[in-house]
Amino acid sequence: MKDADAVGKAGSIECGDYIHVFIKVKEESGQEILNDISYETFGCAAAIASSSMLTEMAKGKTLDEAEKITKMDIVDALGGLPEPKIHCSLMVADGLKEAIKVYREKENK
């Protein structure tokens, strides 16, 4: 994403699954809204599907709402994932939480 307000990183290149979550935030009626979100994911189909679902679930939410998206929320929205692939949804949720953390730290300085 060009000119992202923040980038969150999660996963491990050594393990094969890694994500960058890019966010743009706008203030609307005193709320910080996740105006745009994109990702760059390296990994299996489950990691890519989880990343895509996250963008659908998070876009337009407040940062507080988006931060509450869990790995199981993503798994449920996908209609399930095989047990060995659940970690992909955790990585994606962690990437979003990291992006929000980076954004808030940047804005508080």
Image (cartoon, rainbow, N blue to C red):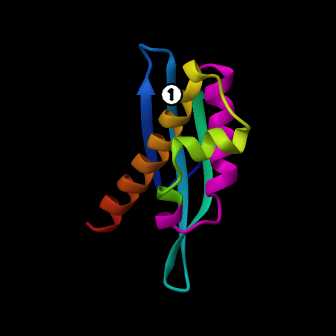
Disc 1 secondary structure class: helix
| Residue at x-position 40% and y-position 58% | 103
What secondary structure is the stretch in magenta mostly built from?
helix
Pinpoint residue 76: horizontal percent, then vertical percent. 66, 42
Give above or below for 88 relative to 44.
below
Relative placement, left or right, of 88 versus 76 is: left
Report which residue position mark 1 lands on. Answer: 87
Give above or below for 31 relative to 109.
below
User: Which residue reaches farthest right?
Assistant: 79
Location of residue 57 by image quarter: bottom right
Location of residue 104 by image quarter: bottom left
Q: How many numbered dots are placed on residues in this image?
A: 1
Pinpoint residue 16: horizontal percent, then vertical percent. 50, 15
| Residue at x-position 60% and y-position 66% | 61
Relative placement, left or right, of 107 versus 5 is: left
| Residue at x-position 53% and y-position 38% | 92
Q: Nearer the viewer, residue 18 or 53?
A: 53
User: Is residue 51 found inside the magenta-colored segment of the image?
Assistant: yes
Relative placement, left or right, of 87 versus 107 is: right
Give above or below for 34 relative to 76.
below
Give above or below for 105 relative to 54.
below
Pinpoint residue 39: horizontal percent, then vertical percent. 60, 40
User: Is residue 98 found inside the magenta-colored segment of the image?
Assistant: no
| Residue at x-position 53% and y-position 52% | 69
Task: Give the residues in magenta.
Answer: 42-65
Q: Nearer the viewer, residue 4 or 95?
A: 95
The kind of residue tagged 1 is His
